[in-house]
Image (spheres, rainbow, N blue to C red):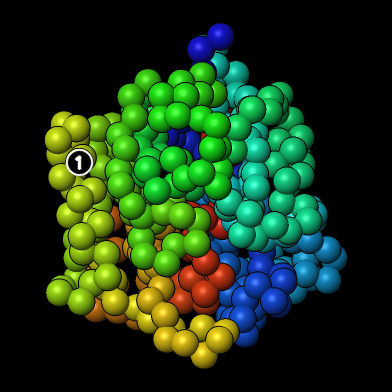
Amino acid sequence: MTYRMPPEWAPQSWLWIGFPHLADEWQGFLSAAQAEIAAFARTVAESGQPARLVCPNEACAALARAMAGDKVDIRIRHYGDIWLRDTGPLVVSDSTGVLHARRFGFNGWGGKYVMPGDTEIGDALANEAGLPQSMADWVLEGGAIDVDGEGLGVTTEQCLLNPNRNPHLSRADIEARLHRDLGIERLLWLGDGLLNDHTDGHVDNLARFVAPGTLALPVAAGGDDPNAAVYANAKARAEAFGLTVVPIPSPGLVERVDAEGELKVQPASHMNFAITTHAVIVPTYGTASDQRAVEAIAACFPGRKTIGLRADAVLAGGGSFHCASQQMPTSA
């Protein structure tokens, strides 16, 4: 049986979204992160696509209902962190159009953040959707890859070749498994991801397909942009691979005082946008690039409404809207 992972712009039945709930993981930003995620879920639901906001217990569910509004579907499931892009199922279509849930090993992003429930939530969501599922024999997070729906994928060497994930697998082994499990026939390897990205360089913070063979990439905001060299290297690799590159403004240097009182560069990116059936939700940070980034991404999706939402607090937890969500494609 041949499988293919649909692109994110394919029609979706709903979007799963994780609701923040662990105060220790949010370093004083929990309430603000909950408000930003609730606004994200509400915006998706108001666009005309169902949003399923996943909460760990009834108390969080009640808070989420009050914050997100009546249009958002609240689901109670056991999980640790909110990053359902990485812990949820990856849904593929077989050659007859039947959807299947692909599940992968998850080790807390290389053993850094291991939380109860994060290895089980993928099974729960797949069962909720009524999908047949299979478990792969290697570690992979959904944010580490992106696809164009026509057999092309993109990832970073920093993440997929990191020895903290699959030390026994070579580059060729990983390519073979991506082909077997997700239908990726050609793979563009980018180099490093963003500075201080605790996922070890997930590609969804750096490069996103916006059409078959077309890759959106950030452009450095100036000489102090901490990721200028990363962006330039990614652009060179993508163009050498034969892809069309769409430039998206970078937020540039975004810093925050961490829990230890140190000023630290944040992996802020407008690239962590979520594509839904009717809308594209773009994270913004109060930077000069916000509006220009929303407009540049909107030009890639003329049939959808592109909306910028603040994501400063979600970023404090280590990700943004794409990281916190996982789409359920519509069956062909």
Q: What crowding class fits label 1: few (fewer than 14 Cα within 10 Å), some (14-19), or many (20 or more)?
A: some
Residue 140 visible in the current orientation: no
> Which amino acid, mark 1?
Arg
Q: Is residue 136 visible?
A: yes
Which residue is denoted by mark 1 in the rendering? Answer: 237
Say which residue appears at 57% left-offset and 64% top-offset.
42
Between residues 145 and 78, which one lies in front from this camera angle?
145
Picture coordinates of residue 138, whole percent (x, y): 60, 32
Picture layout, residue 309 above or below residue 108: below
Please name whichever residue, 278 or 85, is drawn nearer the observer in this view of the structure: 85
Figure label count: 1
Q: Is residue 153 depicted above or below 15 in this figure?
A: above
- Where does residue 186 sit, x and y in percent of width and height? 33, 24
Q: Is residue 270 shown left or right of residue 317? A: left
Quarter of the picture containing the N terminus is top right
Up-down: is 99 above or below 221?
Answer: above
